Image: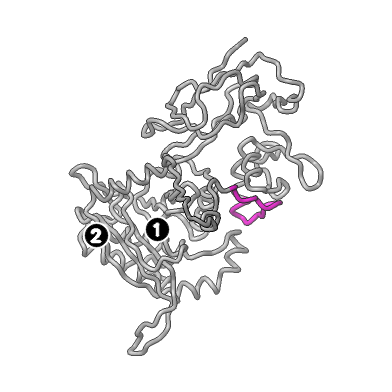
Amino acid sequence: MAIIDVTISQLSESVAEATLLNWKKQPGDAVVVDEILFEIETDKVVFDVPSPASGILFEILVGDGGTVVANQVLARIDNEAKPAAAAPALLETTAESKGALSPAAPSAEGSSTIAMPSAARLMAETGLNPAQVEGTGRHGRITKGDVLSAIAGGAEPATPIPPPAPKLKPVEAYLESPLMTDRPEQRVPMTRLRARIAERLLQSQATNAILTTFNEVNMQAVIELRSRYKEKFEKEHGVKLGFMPFFVKATMQALRKYPVLNASVEGKEIIYHGYFDIGIAVSSPRGLVVPILRNVDQMSIAEIERKIADYSAKAKLGNLSLEELTGGTFSISNGGVFGSMLSTPIINPPQSAILGIHATKDRPVVENGQIVIRPMNYLAMSYDHRIIDGKEAVLGLNAIKDALEDPARLLLDL
């Protein structure tokens, strides 16, 4: 018997511990090298942990929901044990590859397409047909990135994914009770991500002198520009043209004009960042996450749109990496996608400002002494008054407003 320890070493320096979510295998099951054994949740991401060797899962030392730390032994694999006769296909490996591939996924034509383990798992979760995914890996293998690109490009699941079964009885079941004696409650622990969100929001309010300034922007020019070019844009770039890239570009120009909005505080020092890494708040099944668009000043409208679509797809599947969530010099929160009319966003520390955008609605406004109907959006900028005066915040928000009301400024960098 040759025992191989299963450990994790992917935790970053800022993450002291994590939660083992669920095992994909049980003791006695056959495993192959690089096959996913279990999922780990940190305060930022959920990631898969692959098997370090082929063999039989001999022992599990930490069960579902357990707390783990880096380099802790979580299970043991006997890499000399012979698998049961039912598992020969599972143990097929490729000599030329350092890790095993997933079993071949059947395509629509009846042939087989080889997918990497993470890609096969993602296609199974989303119901995506492998025939809809173009493999860019070695020898045409499907990678996880290929699947995410297919999802971002609008590929539809082969079969609808059934909704998860409810863990509690529906409210109607209690209301139908003749005596109304049931008063159900459910106590569940916060996920690490939710606990981290709560911690950071409290930290932000406790350490920053948060103030919010507001303005309104007429979106007519952006709407007309988008309507005029959206079909050509999608045909040329392979992604739909939305409104967020215009907000991102307008924000970047405002940060360039007023650098303190792009700064952060460290002790008694102000750090002025000579780059523009803008975080985009995205809703995920696990809570709010803020992936980072890096070097926005070097990105085109199409590149921004494509990256946001990629982040949105990853957020829905819980596949954002630590690197994609780390850093950022400024953030944008779009409550408008949920119908919010106005809000005061909370700063994402250690940043010093955040822009909140909201639902665009037709409203009466006065132009040249006449009341007209225009598509208006309320903008809100929360800022740390310790280093940002009201003047910079107001002028920065005005710069965003001006760029959106006259999109030619984005092209001419005015």
Q: Which mark is residue 80?
A: none
Q: Nearer the viewer, residue 292 or 61?
A: 61
Rendering coords of residue 78 (x, y %): 61, 16
Q: In the image shown, does 166 or 64 lie closer to the viewer?
A: 166
- The crowd level at tag 1 (other Cα within 10 Å; few <14, some 14-19, many 20+) is many
Q: Residues within 10 Å of mark 2 (few under 14, many from 20)?
A: many
From the top left corner, tell me how far across and down residue 9 is, in percent.
Answer: 46, 27
Q: Which mark is residue 211?
A: 2
**Residue 13 belongs to the span the image colors magenta:** no
Q: What residue lies at 24% left-to-right and 54% top-to-bottom?
A: 384
Work out whether residue 303 can be spotted. no
Q: Which amino acid type is marked by label 2?
A: Leu
- Residue flagged by tag 1: what amino acid is it? Ser
Per the image, label 2 sits on a secondary structure element best described as strand
- Disc 2 to disc 1: CB gap under 8 Å: no
| Residue 261 seen in the current view | yes
Closest to the observer, 165 or 74: 165
Q: Measured from the top left, where is residue 93 in percent x and y?
A: 70, 26
Q: Residue at x 38, y 69 (%)?
A: 403
Left or right of 8 on screen, residue 117: right
| In the image, farthest residue toward the top | 1
Q: Check residue 333 in the rendering and tell me which mark sits there, or answer none.
A: 1
Looking at the rendering, the stretch of residues picked out in magenta corresponds to 150-165
In terms of secondary structure, where does tag 1 sit?
strand
Residue at 44%, 65% in the rendered image: 336
- Residue lying furthest right in this view? 110
Q: From what the image shows, is residue 39 above or below residue 170?
A: above
- Occupied quadrant, residue 190: top left
Magenta stretch: residue 160 in it? yes
Is 101 situated above or below 347? above
